Amino acid sequence: LAFRDVFKAGTSLYGIGDLTALAGDTHKFESRYLDGLVGKYPEDEHLYKKRSPIESVDTLSCPILLLQGAEDKVVPPNQAEMMHNALLKKGIPTCLKIYEGEQHGFRKAENIQDALDSELAFYGTVFGMNIPEAVSLKVENI
C-alpha cells in the first residue's frame, strides 16, 4: 500500500510500519532477524528507511485498517499506533483496533472472528456497501 498504487483499500494485520524503530524494539529472539531480510543495522539504515511505510506516508492514498495484538513482542503495538497517527495526520481514512491478550497473530477465536468481521465492515464503509449485521467500526477521516 505504501509503495504501489494498485489497491483501493487495505488491512494491516500486526504489520511493520517503521523498520528502524523495529530494529531497536523487537524482542531478543527476533533481534537479528531483520539483518537477513533488510541488511545490518545501523550500517544499512538507508535501506530500513527506504522500505518503511512510515517513511512513505506521502505516497499513501487509500484507506487502511490496522489490526494489532496488544502484547505483540515481534511487532510491538507502537508500530500500528505510529502508522495510525501518520494516516490521521494525512487525512486518510483509517481505523486502529488493538486486541487485548493477543500477540503476533491472533489466537482467541472471538478475536479472529472480530478481526474478520471488522475487515468486512471496514471495506463496507470504505466502498459504501451495506453489510447486514456489520460490527460497529469507527473509521476516522471518512
Image: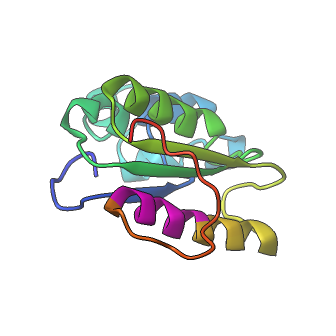
Task: Residue 56: give x, y in percent of width and height.
Answer: 26, 34
Q: Which residue does the image show at 67% across and 57% down from the upper left?
A: 104
Give the quadrant of the C terminus.
Answer: top left
Residue 39 colored in magenta in the image: no
The stretch of residues the image draws in magenta is: 118-126
Task: Out of 75 and 142, give the one closest to the viewer.
Answer: 142
Q: Which colour scheme is used?
A: rainbow
Between residue 24 and residue 90, name the one nearer to us.
90
In terms of image quadrants, where is residue 135? bottom right
Q: Where is residue 141 in the image (x, y as percent from the top left)?
A: 40, 35
Question: Is residue 69 left or right of 55 when viewed as pictured?
Answer: right
Judged left or right of residue 120, residue 90 is: left
Q: Which of the 4 image quadrants contains residue 73?
A: top right
Give me the residue at 81% from left, 49% from top.
Answer: 100
Percent of width and height locating residue 124: 43, 66
Q: Can residue 23 be seen in this view?
A: no
Is residue 120 highlighted in magenta? yes
Q: Where is residue 41 in the image (x, y as percent from the top left)?
A: 42, 31
How many marks the image carries: the answer is 0
Give the prevailing secondary structure in the magenta stretch: helix
Q: Which residue is drawn at 27% across and 45% down?
A: 2
Q: Which residue is drawn at 33% across and 62% down?
A: 127
Q: Can residue 9 be seen in this view?
A: yes
Looking at the image, residue 55 lies above or below residue 98: above
